[in-house]
Amino acid sequence: MSVRIALFQSTTGIDPDANAEALVDAIAAASSGGAAMLFTPEMSGLLDRNSERARSHLAEESGDRVLASCRDAARDKGMWVNIGSLAVLDAGGKVANRAFVIDPAGEVRARYDKMHLFDVDLPTGESWRESATYSAGESAVVVDGTPLGKLGLTICYDVRFPSLFARLAEAGADAIAVPAAFTVPTGEAHWHVLLRARAIEAGLFVIAAAQVGAHADGRRTYGHSLVIDPWGEILLDMGDKAGVGFATIEPQRIAEVRSRLPALKHRRPVPEVTFS
């Protein structure tokens, strides 16, 4: 049985209330379009390089206004929502880059904190140090019972670490979400090839809702939200415009591809490296 999903490609700004309103509108659009589940990008509630200003908006999960708005909207529309991530205060005042899966009753069914933090200096002169603000997650997460079956959760830079995707596939994931805020240089060079590779290696669907365009804090993000099937075929590419896009998932495609190319069954533990 096919499943219709929606992706929100956003240009998230520095006003959480405006961002929450955009998310609520996206949930309504996804519902009107017949989607069973909506996927949103990384940092859907706030995207702000000014750390002092950004921190003034942060709250613990229980007090996060964006999360509360999305839970209410999911309940109102009776649909599943994967919030790609929000910045929330964690224990001890640290910040977590946290993904949420919300069910049609508005309940949070799963949480995932980004494991791999983006600390890089790009040839363009851009410099990023996520570890200066965020604490890294320590657990891989699969949530069962979604319209897609078992959904594995990742965030952005995690896509460069195939062992995480392999672990999620081995745990029975049918699809993996990869919400992102990719920079333009890294997106142009690596976005499509990395996501297609992860789908092919794991033999499952990859759903990657992305930030796009020029943001209020001065950054630019790549966009091209993607849905990729287990053979690596691109079912949806949203290009460089913000909005809500739709794709149809055929779950039986997983079994078809894995029967043709049973790489998961052939996987063996990696032995110790010998030097000679």
Image: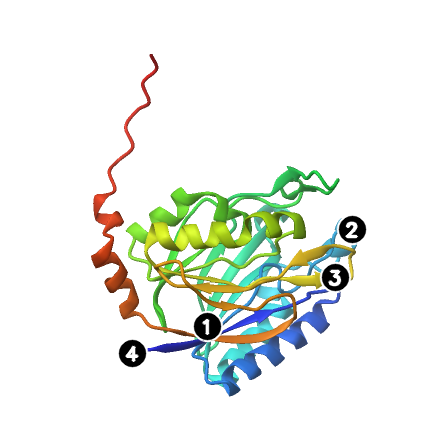
Task: Residue under label 1, please give it.
Answer: 107
Q: Considering depth in this image, is 166 or 150 the residue closer to the camera?
A: 166
Q: Is residue 101 left or right of residue 231?
A: right
Q: Residue at x 36, y 53 (%)?
A: 200
Q: Considering depth in this image, is 106 or 85 the residue closer to the camera?
A: 85
Q: Amino acid at mark 4?
A: Met
Badge 1 element: loop
Give residue 117's position: percent from left, percent from top: 57, 43
Q: To which quarter of the image does residue 135 belong?
A: top right
Residue lying furthest bottom in this view?
32
Q: Can residue 95 be seen from the camera position used here?
A: no
Q: Which of labels 2 and 3 is toward the front?
A: 3
Q: Distance between the Cα atoms at labels 3 and 1?
A: 33 Å
Quadrant (top left, top right, bottom left, bottom right) of the C terminus: top left
Q: Amino acid at mark 2?
A: Glu
Q: Amino acid at mark 1?
A: Glu
Can you tell which mark lies on residue 52? Answer: 2
Q: Distance between the Cα atoms at labels 2 and 4?
A: 48 Å
Q: Distance between the Cα atoms at labels 4 and 3?
A: 39 Å
Give residue 174's position: percent from left, percent from top: 33, 62
